[in-house]
Each structure stands twice: as C-alpha cells, then as structure tokens.
Image (cartoon, grey):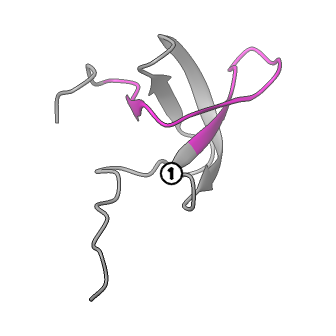
Amino acid sequence: MWAVVPGPPWIPDPGVLVKDTAGGRLGKAIAWDGDTRTVTLAPPEGGEPWETAAFCPANERAGRP
C-alpha cells in the first residue's frame, strides 16, 4: 500500500509574490521543488534567493486559508 503524503494547499506560479512565514520575508517565487516541498524565493528588490517550506500567498496571514 502506498502512503499518501498531503501536498501543500497552494503552490505558487513563478513570479508570484509569496510570504515566507518562517522568516517573515516576502519574495517572488522562482522555483518549486516537489521532492522537498520547498519554494525558492528571490527578494523583489533583487538579492540572493532562498528556500522555504513554510509559505503562503503574500496577501494572507500565516495559518489562515
């Protein structure tokens, strides 16, 4: 029997503004890694990208649908 692993409720499209709920930063989505369930974000003003597994749409509060 296969284990069912729930996916994230939302996967951002590239270029969408995303809130990193673990770090409290905003970034533009540049990649999604389904194996690690992380999104790679880049600062909107430019800079080094980072990865996070805790995220939501920029206009939502963490933990709220």
Q: Is residue 57 left or right of residue 48?
A: left
Question: Element under label 1?
Answer: loop
Please, which residue is most extreme toward the bottom here? Answer: 1
Name the residue rendered at 40%, 25% in the picture. 58
Q: Position of residue 18 (x, y in %)?
A: 49, 30
Name the residue rendered at 42%, 31% in the picture. 55
Name the residue rendered at 74%, 14% in the picture. 45
Up-down relation of residue 31 to residue 7 (above or below) = above
Corner quadrant of residue 33: bottom right
Up-down relation of residue 39 to residue 21 (above or below) = below
Q: Position of residue 22 (x, y in %)?
A: 45, 18
Q: Is residue 1 left or right of residue 57?
A: left
Name the residue rendered at 28%, 61% in the picture. 6
Up-down relation of residue 29 to residue 31 (above or below) = above
Q: Is residue 17 left or right of residue 21?
A: right
Q: Position of residue 9 (x, y in %)?
A: 28, 51
Q: Quadrant of the C terminus?
A: top left
* Viewer-closest of 30 and 15: 30
Q: Which residues are magenta?
A: 39-59
Please, which residue is most extreme toward the front here? Answer: 1
Q: Which residue is mark 1?
A: 37
Corner quadrant of residue 5: bottom left
Counting labels gives 1
Up-down relation of residue 21 to residue 34 (above or below) = above
